[in-house]
Image (cartoon, rainbow, N blue to C red):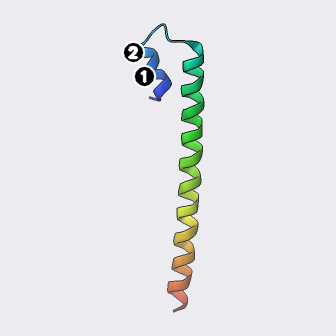
Amino acid sequence: MNSAQLHRQKFPSARPSTIAYLEKRDETTARLKSEVEARRRKRLSWLYWIWRRA
């Protein structure tokens, strides 16, 4: 459950602008998490390549 849904449950008559902000923030957070994971995989594969050649 994302933060916008939790906010709607807690505050049923929340402002639409607040809900839109929370949804955008959730999308940004998900995108950044995927970028961090991709960088982590790339870094680990590079270290594995160095270790394998040594």
* Secondary structure category for the residue under label 2: helix
Residue placed under numbered mark 2 in the picture: 10
36 or 17, nearer to the observer: 17
Which residue is depicted at the point 55% across and 42% down?
30
Q: Is residue 11 left or right of residue 47?
A: left
Residue placed under numbered mark 1 in the picture: 6
Instruction: Report which quarter residue 18 is drawn in.
Output: top right
Q: Is residue 23 left or right of residue 6?
A: right
Q: How many marks?
A: 2
Q: Answer yes or no: do the residues labelled 1 and 2 have beta carbons within 8 Å?
A: yes
Which residue is depicted at the point 55% across and 72% down?
45
Point out residue 53 in the picture as x, y percentages from the top left corner: 55, 90
Vertical arrangement, residue 29 with respect to residue 20, above or below: below
Three-letter amino acid code at the position of disc 2: Lys
Q: Which mark is residue 43?
A: none
Label 1 CA crowd tier, 10 Å (few <14, some 14–19, many 20+):
few
Point out residue 46 in the picture as x, y percentages from the top left corner: 57, 76
Three-letter amino acid code at the position of disc 1: Leu
Q: Farthest residue toward the bottom?
A: 54
Instruction: Report which quarter residue 29 is drawn in.
Output: top right
* Secondary structure category for the residue under label 1: helix
> What is the quadrant of the N terminus in the image?
top left
Which residue is depicted at the point 47% across and 22% down?
5
